[in-house]
Amino acid sequence: MKVGLFFGSYNPIHIGHLAIANYFIEYTNLEKLWFVISPQSPFKTKQTLLSETQRYNMVFTAIEDDSRFKACNIEFHLPKPSYTIDTLIYLAEKYPEHEFSIIMGADNILNFHKWKNYEIIAKNHDIYVYKRPRIDLSLYKNSNRIHIVDAPQIEISASFIRKAIADKKDVRYFLHKNVWHYIDEMNLYK
């Protein structure tokens, strides 16, 4: 089975993430998509990061009724900081029947050369890249393993949502209704 791994902190997961995930399932050859919740990115600070459990719960509640998607907390059990290569090796050993690909935004592909063992990742895994405004991806057009996907561009960020909630703004329509209820009930980001 072809599984797309959509890595992120999901702090919180929002409709932009869900729309992109839906697009990849419908318009590529991926059969399933796993939202891999990252405990800590080696490129980001941890200051506003909710607990692993809270972020996993938000992803799970957003996708629980869609069998095409899975909330994946595998990186919570791996050494930190988490590196994609280590996750891919672990998943390949645990699920040898799956073929894993990576889904990332155009902003991430620009820094891909800084990733640990990026050459091995690029050699062994397909990488699906969705466009972002004002990022030129023409360099990757003829790659065998990097696939540029013309998914709709939705300019919503988790940092915008966190700030809006802290500012007492109603942003419920930027989130899946279950995630909005979870954030409200748990009094998060306030």
Image: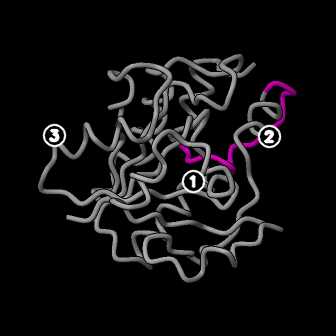
Q: Secondary structure at mark 3?
A: helix
Instruction: Tell me which residue sits at (28%, 41%) in the image.
Output: 89
**Circle number at residue 94:** 3
Image: magenta residue range? 166-177
Q: Residue 160: give its label.
A: 2
Q: Are marks 1 and 2 in contact (CB under 8 Å)?
A: no
Mark 2 / mark 3, whichever is N-terminal: 3
Image quarter of the C terminus: top right
The residue depicted at 76 percent of the width and 36 percent of the height is: 159
Kindly identify the residue that appears in the image at 35 percent across and 37 percent down: 87
The label shown at residue 17 is 1
Q: Position of residue 186 (x, y in %)?
A: 57, 18
Q: Nearer the viewer, residue 131 or 56?
A: 131
Q: Residue furthest left?
A: 97
The part of the image, by quadrant, that contains residue 139 is bottom right
- In the rendered image, the vertical position of residue 25 relative to residue 177, given as above or below: below
Few, some or many C-alpha atoms within 10 Å of disc 2 (few <14, some 14-19, many ≥20)? few
**Which percent across, then down, holds residue 117?**
45, 43
Q: CA distance from mark 2 to mark 3?
A: 36 Å
Real-space Cα separation, disc 1 to disc 3, in angstroms: 26 Å
Label 1 or label 2, whichever comes before in sequence order: 1
| Amino acid of disc 1 | His
Q: Secondary structure at mark 2?
A: helix
Going by the numbered disc 2, the residue's amino acid type is Phe
Marks 2 & 3, CB-CB < 8 Å contact: no
- Quarter-wise, where is residue 78 in the image? top left
| 67 horizontally vs 19: left or right | left
Discs 1, 3 touching: Cβ within 8 Å: no
Percent of width and height locating residue 92: 21, 46
